[in-house]
Image (tube, helix red, strand yellow):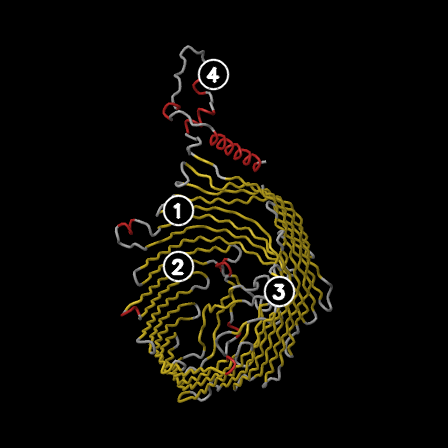
Amino acid sequence: MKQAAWCASALAVFALAAHAEGAPSSAPAEKAAEVPPPDPTAPAGAASQWWSFDEKALLDGLGMDTDGGLAGLGSWHAILDLRANGNLQSTEPANDPKQEYYSYLTDQGITVRNEGWYVLDPRLLTGTASVRFGLQQAHEDSGDLKLAQDASVTDYYVNVALLQEKPYNATLQASHVEFVTSQAGGGTTASSHSLRGATLYWREASILRDKEIAPYFSATLLAGQEDLQETTTNAGQQFRRDEQRDRAQFNAHNGFETGDLTVSLEQIDLANKIFPDGSYRSRSADGSYSLDFGDNLTRHSDTHVNYNERTGDFGTETLNVDQSLFFEHNAFLSSNLYYVYESVDSALGSSTTNRADAGIQYLPFLNVSTSFDATGSHVAYDTGRVDGYGGSAGLTYSHWLPAGGVLSASATGGLYYTDSQLSSALLPVVDSPYQAPPELGAGAGFLLNETDVVTSTIVVVNVRGGARLPTELGIDYEVEVEGNRTRIVPLATSAVIQGGDPLEVSYSYLTDPDLKSRIGTQSYLVSASWDWIAVSLTQDMTRQTPISGQQATLLSDQNRAALRVDVHHDWGDWRALGNVRAARYRDERLSYDEIRLNENLTWRPSYHWQLTLGGSQTQSEFVDSGRTSRNYDARLGGTWHSRQGWWADGYLTWRTQQDSEMADETITEGFFRVRRNWPQLTLSCSVGFGQRDRDTVKTMYQNIQIDITRTF
């Protein structure tokens, strides 16, 4: 009832404004404001004529006429929508009863929207406002948990622009939206998101240009608050988020005749109401300056400074400064310098890094290029220091081949020295950024950058949307170790990690605490390519030799060779791509042989539709352990659209992992969606299904989603 009363009041106000907008021009405001004096002869208690309501006189007095007036309304739109989402999942272990999880949600709503309304003048204040009233019916059946409820939903959106044509202007925004989405691989996420904020703009055409102080200066200042409630349900697991984020950000840019300066300041306060340890305050400052200088502007400088501080249960403080210089001496000779300073302070420990690089590039002939590089570094930890220095040289050669081919060859060699003086063999890595694979399951994962990782120290955090969402080993991800390499494998049944999510991984790894060593590197490449085929052979070798210090070391020689063949061909409506790569990796603690094949075939008989068939196969055989790992996948997809407004797309995928030391996993998924657009009506329907077999557990899911929107 309160929503209906509020809506009726709002519609009455808009109707008055619309009536005033169509009224003829009135007399001057000062005349319209005159009212007759009260009649002294009128009996007490009688209605006095001077205060009686005269709608026309009021609107005329406020100046709401067709010539602009006090306010005006833009274009009206009304939208009716119907949404339905159904999801069914089942888990069937080999020796346990089958478990089913079922949920559906229907949502019907009406949206009223006005675009381009203004106050006094569109150049002063204008905006867009909409409100949606919806009714939802939800049902969930997850074994012991059964839930059915009806609820009303009010979504709104308000965007106001102040002085939008002036150099100094502002935007105010407030919104609230609730929605449900189906996740890839099954499961649903119900979200409620609210936003309130303001942005101030300082454009280039300001007083600074008029005074010729900074003619190309611009800046923005943003402040806002966000509320997010989110519930993800996947295969009986449920993960909830309830966060409030306060954010303030300042960005400025100034252009010079031959340079650019950019500055950014930001503060974020995130309150995690479900997981308080995930709450934090972060402050960051970022500045970069680039400059072209010298004769004919053939020299370039880039300076970058970044500072970040985060408080909370796992606070960190980092400072990064890097400077690069590039010199183009002539058409054949160039050189470069690079320096980086990095300071990290966290609960795991602190470190300070200084590194400098220098390089020279020389072209003695048009088809021959050479390079010479030198580097030096000093890293200070709480437990000691690690120093390193060295250099490398490289040569690249290219030549034409018969039948339009190109021959390319390169060789690079380097020599480096390291000196470790540490009281502990453990070194920390803090918040190293990674990304979850776009499709989870069937062994998809990523390797950690360092070797000899202590797996008990691994902490994986999902930083989707700026949050810090904790994850759990065995539920959200698994850890695979082969030799001295460590791999993180997110699980498809995780309710926290979704495909493509940004992740941060912290851990400690082993190093030689008291050792001086020499590292020699060699790298070779030979390739030949034509219009339809390319062949390349690469070899990389590393020799690590202890010079002094401890007897037992983690040093190991490495030798990797790879042969790759790529083919492609176009004929008519068909296009085919393919490649095969065979690699041999030899290390004293990790040796394996690997072969990979990738194929892709596309058929596009017309502009309106196409079909694509793709596949890949990978086999890895580990020499020392005897482990064999195979991965296969195939995908058939297509798109189609017509001039009448029909759109359709879909795919069918199959992925499997077969590993001699791990549980086998096979995933089959399908998706189909059709959409029809009319001038004022949109219809969309999608269906998804999948089956996941992991060891002796079978998981199946089906979901359907329907959206109908009618615009008036």
* Res. 265 image quadrant: bottom left
Which tag is nearer the camera, tag 2 or tag 3? 3
Residue 430 located left or right of residue 374: right
Q: Position of residue 310 (x, y in %)?
A: 42, 61
Which tag is nearer the camera, tag 1 or tag 2? 1
**Could you tell which of marks 2 and 3 lies nearer the N-terminus?**
2
**Could you tell which of marks 1 and 2 lies nearer the N-terminus?**
1
Mark 2 belongs to which amino acid? Arg
Location of mark 3 (residue): 604
Label 1 element class: strand
Label 4 element class: loop
Q: Gap in Å between the C-alphas at discs 1 and 3? A: 48 Å
Which tag is nearer the camera, tag 1 or tag 3? 3
Q: Gap in Å between the C-alphas at discs 4 and 1? A: 47 Å
Which tag is nearer the camera, tag 4 or tag 1? 1
Label 2 element class: strand
Location of mark 2 (residue): 283
Q: Gap in Å between the C-alphas at discs 2 and 4? A: 64 Å
Which tag is nearer the camera, tag 2 or tag 4? 4
Which tag is nearer the camera, tag 4 or tag 3? 3
Q: Gap in Å between the C-alphas at discs 4 and 3? A: 81 Å
Q: Position of residue 106 (x, y in %)?
A: 65, 48
Local packing at callout 3 (Cα closer than 10 Å; few below 14, some 14-19, many 20+) is some
Mark 3 belongs to which amino acid? Arg
Location of mark 4 (residue): 47
**Could you tell which of marks 4 and 1 lies nearer the N-terminus?**
4
Location of mark 1 (residue): 170
Q: Position of residue 691 (x, y in %)?
A: 68, 65
Mark 4 belongs to which amino acid? Ala
